[in-house]
Image (cartoon, grey):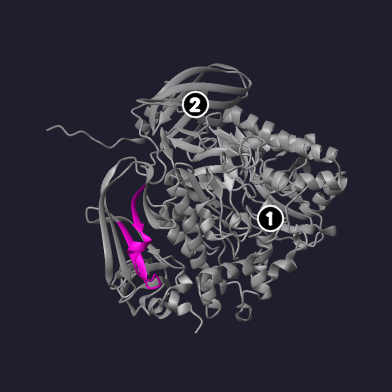
Amino acid sequence: MHKTNTSLNPLFLILILISFLSCGNQPDSVSVSEIKLKENWKFKSTNDIEWNEATVPGTVHTDLIDLGTIEDPFYRLNEHNLQWIDKEDWEYKTSFNVSGATLSDQNVELDFAGLDTYASVYLNDSLILQTDNMFRNYAVEVKRLLKAGENKLRVLLESPIKKGIEKYDATPFQIPVSDNDLSKIGKVEGEKKVSVFTRKAGYHFGWDWGPRLVTSGIWRPITLRSWSNHKIEDLFIQQNSIDKKASLTAFIEVMSNKDDEGAQVEIDVNGTPFKTAEVKLTKGQNTLNIPFEIENPELWWPNGMGEQVLYTVEAKVTSNSYTDSKSHKIGLRTIELVRQPDSIGASFYFKVNGHPVFMKGANYIPQDVFLTRAKEPQYKHILSSAKEANMNMIRVWGGGIYENDEFYQLCDEMGLLVWQDFMFACAMFPGDEAFLENVRQEAIDNVKRLRNHTSIALWCGNNENLSAWENWGWKDNVTKEQSKEVADTIWKAYDDVFHKILPEVVTKYDNSRAYWPSSPGSDFGEKESHEKGDAHYWMVWWGKEPFDNYNKAIPRFMSEYGFQSFPEFASVKKYTAPEDHDIYSEVMKSHQRSSIGNNTIEEYMLRHYKKPEDFESFLYVSQLLQSHGIKIGIEAHRRNRDRCMGSLYWQINDCWPVASWSSIDYYGKWKALHYSAKKSFKTFLISHENTEDNIDLFVISDSLKNINAKLKVSLIDFEGNELQQWEEDITVETNNSNKYLSLSKKELGRKSKDVLLSVQLLLGDKVVADNNIYLSPFKKLDFPSPELTYSVKENNDSFEVIVKTKKLAKDVFISSASDENFSDNYFDMLPNAEKTVSISKNSLDLESFIESLKVVTLVDSYEK
């Protein structure tokens, strides 16, 4: 038998390679290469001589913390001693090597994704860039200044306070700003409120839930980018229509160094070539429009309504044997803001894939006052917590930042629609030409950066600027204290930004999405109304009105409302000393930025609960209070979905450890509110309405199909005796809210201090919704000692806590030394019930977990 020799000698391999290259089929060269400049950074104050190690991306404050120059700004009162930092100028420098290969490329640029804020940039001692907007992206061609080998980059950051004072003093009138600009804490000259003059995150200057720590730094990456022949500068996948086919257009912005009549574009979807086209490139800027279709598209749905299918669309442009590519993950869906006249006024709701969707969610602020400390794990935690709480919308509030790409990618993956504010909040702003053009470029940069994200549902001009002008007395005060001409000038600046520049940018660069000028508002230039538009309802909290007013104040879309609580004791101990453990201590008052804060929590608490026995119990009951109030609001909004189609409470997260409206504290611990929101935002909800004579029971459904179910109601006492029962077979209508049962208060027929109504919606044997209705205020109820016991079981990656109770256990709170959250917490247990909750093991062993475990109920908090 003849044997073939399978080993190939080296000469034969060389001949094959030469043959392949000579036939002209060699692979195209990559047009663009990138290097992140994140090594070898040093920093110092311009008043110092010595340079110190720095982290880029980063901030001056975090570098000073790492250096040991300042203590933790969040601990006790340290923030107040650090106000000198924002009055100084700071310098950053690095050196980096450039290869001959990089210099041989036709173009080399430095791309600055985020400079905070007043920066002068020097390359090899030549000034290449000056900036005044932390929200903008700047790219500078630098090939002529680079050399082979070592190159030096220096960034001078001028004090935003000194620059702000210059602009403040140069303005011949005063621009109204809310008290959230904490210039007194900031020790600013004359307590001048300078935040509006600088295109910088407003919350850095303080807010009623945040510290005043005005940062400077290089907060997003600096990239050295080299390219030859051409590069793709932007790719936008516009969805034209979706039916049996998805009709799309790839808009590709290409910068080319030369003309090319025979360039090629290839569109790939999920790695498969979908469309190729021959195109003409001319020297300079080119915009290519490539239509393509996807057959039988799988739709993207908001959380709770279906899957979040994402397609990877890649565009490749080949010219003169060079190829550049860019890709985005997109979901195929339709979204529209429906504003139609009706019997009330005008609707305000979102329709996704042809279906009206009740928006369930919360407002979001930056996760840290030092932006670069929020990384992917922190984003995942907050957004997965939102998803787990059955939310489908997050509002990115206008006093923070246009968030990092990771944020929107996670929202795309998790089905969280994004109401995206532009970065303006609670202030009026300058209207000079330079400021307006700066805003225009900021808007273009961020609309183009974010528009491919499926999660973006709405662009909104500002947060509460119109309300402040019309409802907070600003217009009248300016007219009275300055002049009508000044008021007209300030309003013209508002009109230019929010009624002209921003909608023009959205129309030009993302015309498939709606633009809304101000939240809250009724229309362009029309102030808030509960008959149309969106509303911020703050008469609960700021107006000291009762929680029950949530049942009356029902707008078309509630985009803000809220109530405060404290973090749990384990969190408070991280930023306080034992002597601070009184809500009126200097430290606890400083970690409370609402002007009416701790007094208001206590006032509402004593309306609803008995006085807690100690500091730790006060923190716990404050969370129960917050949860109780917002639960009333969520249920009222969902119950009245024929009028109101959104409930976004203020707020999901914190940027430092503080008493605030958040449902998740700075350290990532879920408060009672987040656990109750998870239940209140489920697809099916049972809610009740109190009338003079009856208790009316409603079932609310966000499902896209009808279900046949059983509504079961039991009147039980706190010892576990069933006194009455009602059962009714019902059809729960799709995407609707209906009253299904009305119970006469007279028929309940007994005192209400030791009974409750347990209501369940059953689909077969499965409970798909439940609620407990108490017939008197909590402080008047005769809660028994629950006779509660618990045990612990260890699994491979979690601990389980099995809780049993003989009598009603109200607001069971389980705590431990773990930083993780339990699967459920702050829950009621009916008499003779058993419940198992779990928690990730993390780094705790069983013995340590059991030793730290604590289980309390509401009766344990009472003052003895």
Kindly identify the residue that appears in the image at 46 percent across and 60 percent down: 674
Judge from the rendering whether residue 475 lies leftward or rightward of residue 347; answer left or right.
right
Q: Badge 2, how many Cα within 10 Å: few under 14, some, many 20+?
A: many
Answer whether residue 403 is visible to the viewer in this image. Answer: no
Q: Which mark is residue 204?
A: 1
Measured along the vertical axis of the image, is residue 129 above or below residue 786?
A: above
- Where is mark 2, residue-wise? 250
Comparing 781 with 32, the one in front is 781
* Residue range of the region highlighted in magenta in the rendering: 739-760
Q: Which mark is residue 671?
A: none
Q: In the orientation shown, which residue stands out farthest toward the left?
A: 1
Give 180 or 242, whichever is nearer the viewer: 180
Instruction: Determine whether 641 is above or below 591 in the image.
Output: above
- The amino acid marked with disc number 2 is Ala
Find numbered disc 1 in the image and state the secondary structure of the residue it sits on: helix
Image coordinates of residue 72 in percent, x first then y, are: 65, 68
Query: In the structure shown, which secondary structural element does the residue marked by tag 2 occupy?
Result: strand
Q: Is residue 269 above or below residue 640?
A: above
Could you tell me if residue 316 is visible in this image? yes
Q: Nearer the viewer, residue 23 or 634?
A: 634
Q: How many marks?
A: 2
Whether the magenta-drawn stretch holds residue 742 is answered as yes
